[in-house]
Image (spheres, rainbow, N blue to C red):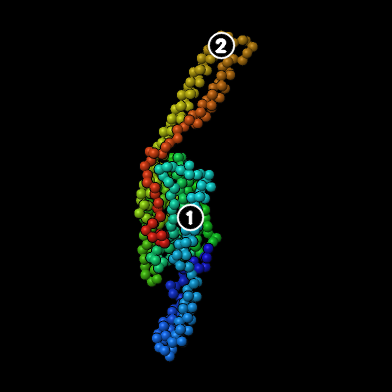
Amino acid sequence: METKRNLNYFIAPPISIATLIGLIISVVAIVLIFFPSTRIIGIIALIIGLGIAVFTSGGKATDTDIEFQAVEFTKDLEEDSMKKNEVYEKNFLKTMKPLHLTGFDFDESLPDFHYRRGRDGTHRTNYYMGASLIFTSEKVYIYSRHFSLTDESHNEVNSVSYKYSDLSHSELEERTFKGKAGKLDVDVPLHIFKLFNSAGECVFKMYINYGADSDLAVENVNRTINVRSEELRKLAEEKARKIEEFRAKVAKEAEEDRKKAKPQQPKNEEPASSIIPENIEESVSAAEEVVSAEEPVFSDESVSAEEPDLSDKSDPAEDE
């Protein structure tokens, strides 16, 4: 990562004095070319002026450079998450495909924070974040990377997972960032994706590139959380019921065995009642394993959701 050129993108003036001198020389040279007596001088001056302008303007990154680096550092998050958590495509919910979230971080409390509005009109900072959210039948896996475009030492990778029963909902929070574009004050509209646990605490948040599908994606996340939580709750209740029924059945059979064994019990043998309770526990443990093995696998067809994408597709070069 070219951190020095990236830093100049945020702090250097739009046109340096050296670049301005080169452009002035170029303009004068073009005028001299129109006169036969100064044409040769004009051509030489034009070459020199353009050389100065090009050379001095190459010390800072462009809008395209910043966008390219941001994409490069976040494009493999889903693959990295699959390797880290050992979760693969066969484990994905069919009705809720993974989300890929990206966006410049506008948290002004970050060290050496810088902001700039690019020539393309996109508002950027020197901090960027990307995250991959993978939805399986029981959990949501979140793998994220937060890094600085001007300081290579800041490159944080986090991996967490949450059971659906531990989550409440997600939402988009709107806020406004007040910055400066040259000498002008600007208000930048922003959107923050937030995920809350069942206690109402925010467990994950990030600034995102807001697009046409952002609100729909949040709705689909909430629908998935609600439906999967309810299905898993019913599954747990069914499992507990089957285990309880099996316990009662084993206890009843044990009682019948005691009644049959009591009249025929030799005096020197241990009472059957001291042996059967152990058999009961072994049987119940075996039953729990059977019940767990027979848990139904949901087809996920009960969750109706379109494939979401929170990235802004209106402009490939524009990130918020």
Q: Is residue 104 visible?
A: yes
Task: Please state the total of marks drawn on the protein image.
Answer: 2
- Compared to 102, does 112 lie above or below? below
Q: Indicate the secondary structure of the residue bearing disc 2.
A: loop
- Quadrant of image for the C terminus: bottom left
Q: Is residue 163 visible?
A: no
The outermost residue toward the front is: 36
The percent position of residue 206, horizontal first and vertical second, equals: 43, 54
Kindly identify the residue that appears in the image at 41 percent across and 66 percent down. Answer: 118
Q: Indicate the secondary structure of the residue bearing disc 1.
A: loop
Disc 1 residue type?
Answer: Lys
The outermost residue toward the bottom is: 37
The outermost residue toward the top is: 263
- Seen from the viewer's position, the closer of residues 42 and 15 is 42
Kindly identify the residue that appears in the image at 46 percent across and 78 percent down. Answer: 50
- Seen from the viewer's position, the closer of residues 274 and 150 is 150
Question: Label 1 near label 2: C-beta < 8 Å?
Answer: no
Find residue 238 and name its label: none
- Seen from the viewer's position, the closer of residues 36 and 104 is 36
- Mark earlier in primary sequence (2, 1): 1
Left or right of 82? Residue 221 is left
Disc 2 residue type?
Answer: Lys
The percent position of residue 167, horizontal first and vertical second, equals: 43, 43
Q: Which residue is mark 1?
A: 75
Find residue 262 and name its label: 2
Location of residue 268 by image quarter = top right
Q: Residues within 10 Å of mark 1 (few under 14, many from 20)?
A: some
The percent position of residue 161, horizontal first and vertical second, equals: 48, 45
Location of residue 182 by image quarter = bottom left
